[in-house]
Amino acid sequence: MTSDRQAPTTPTTPIIPITRSGHAVVLGAGVGGLLAARVLTEHFERVSVLDRDNLADLADLADLAELADVSPAELGARRGVPQAGHLHALMDRGRQILEDLHPGLVAELVDAGAPTSEALVGGRWYLQGRRVGPVPTGLTSVLASRPLLERELRRRTAALPGVRVLARTAVVGLVGAAPGGAVTGVRIRAGDGDGAPTVLAAELVVDASGRNSRTLDWLAAAGHPTPPTSRVTVDLGYASRLYRRRPEHLDGDLSVIIATTPGLRGGGAAAVEGDRWIVTLAGLLGEHPPTDHDGFCAFARRLVAPDIADLIHAATPLGDAVPYRFRESVRRHFEALRRPPDGLVVIGDALCSFNPLYAQGMTVAAQQALVLRDCLRSGLGGGLPGRFYRAVGPVNDVAWDMAASSDLRYPAVTGRRTLRGRVTGSYAARAQRSAHRDPAVARTLMRVVHLTEPPAALLRPALAARVLVPGAVGGRARPAPHGPS
């Protein structure tokens, strides 16, 4: 919790008149790619968004509530976003950026049925095995499923002047990636991939293709040095299931989050459009939840608080539970390269892939899009990729340090441990315990979690004194039953 770095909330360079010209290509039509495309429209006459998946399955539905009786997989998980059918959270900072780039988007999500609530007031949070009290924070949670959010972003992006979204289009290589040269486009195959690839020329390529990006392989094959990589191996397993929601569930609250600490198991439930719950159970280091009905329910009963188990006992399931596995967080340090290739920028999970337990991915991708916009306002020349990686480093630092320091408290988690990380993790754990008895600590902690304040906010002298003051913490959760799992 020692970093005070935070993504800029406003551009740091003057906004000057820009003549739109040229062509930019975005690899990936997920949240990061769509937000990057929105930023690129301010500088390029044409923007092409490429995705290998068939994006039409959900895009043409008038209302996702039509999918009321489906499994999480049918709700929208696709090859490029295998986690789409699981619980997602858009942090308040992410909501602010989406509203900045797409004014009125949150209202459209609400019109489509997505609930909203204030963090800690309309939902329940369990940290260190105890519930944090309902303290006003000023933070808004938008409880939209990932497919609904992507659908609305894709619809708005495709409607922008000069934008085309090309589904079922696979990128098979970069053009002009020789050492010392600039990337000048991509090689693509459309449809089922039959036939020779064609070249799509571009002044700028933005790789937002996710954690399975092939860019590093292509650059290495062309003779470029690969960036240093940080890894934190957590062996996380998910299982998610949809349930019918009734107003009396959770006494009217709209979400419940039970953190994995103490222990290796946790979970969450959120109300989403179509009067449904998405319930996700999670376990680290091989403690993965089963997907069969009895095993799923038994895993929920073993959590440190009973809320999720009580909910799934009372609610009607809609389809079977589906699994998802996440082995490790990965950060690629392009900022360490002396001269990254011009014409290519890597963002989103392709740049930094976070443990999804902390729900940082979509919001960090949104922050990265703002950094890209700021760098573009300084011009395409002058080593744009290098400027971007240096500027985006502090954004990635904040989220990475918070997640890694938490994960590395488990001795069996592999990753680079530092004295700073140990101190950060220890202080963060103490702040979480203090949040149960101190509303000021709880409010600041949640604002840090939502990335609206830097971690250093918890180190301000007046607040640090409250965190470090000795004393018992109340609000202990009711122990979970200790039956067989």
Image: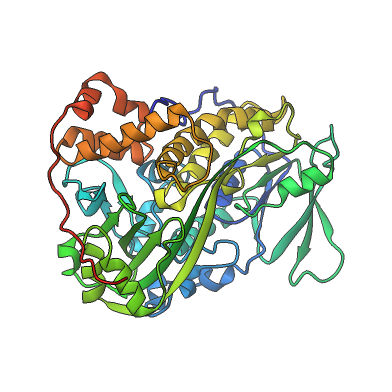
Q: Residue at x 78, y 59 (%)?
A: 188
Quarter placement of the C terminus = bottom left
Q: Quadrant of residue 136?
A: top left
Q: In screen coordinates, is 477 left or right of 427? A: left
Residue nearest the viewer, comparing 157 with 142 = 142
Count of picture labels: 0
Residue 107 position within the rendered picture, expressed as x and y whole percent measured from the top left = 35, 54
Q: Quadrant of residue 462?
A: top left
Q: Is residue 457 above or below residue 127?
A: above
Q: Residue at x 67, y 38 (%)?
A: 20
Answer yes or no: is residue 118 visible: no
Q: Is residue 195 above or below residue 435?
A: below
Q: In screen coordinates, is 49 left or right of 141? A: right
Q: In screen coordinates, is 447 left or right of 246? A: right
Answer yes or no: is residue 81 visible: yes
Residue nearest the viewer, comparing 32 with 429 = 429
Residue 185 position within the rendered picture, expressed as x and y whole percent measured from the top left = 79, 47
Residue 237 position within the rendered picture, expressed as x and y whole percent measured from the top left = 46, 62
Scheme of colours in the image: rainbow
Q: Residue at x 39, y 46 (%)?
A: 95
Q: In screen coordinates, is 393 left or right of 162? A: left
Residue 97 position within the rendered picture, expressed as x and y whole percent measured from the top left = 44, 41
Residue nearest the viewer, comparing 315 with 57 = 315
Quarter placement of the N terminus = top left
Q: Is residue 207 above or below residue 367?
A: below
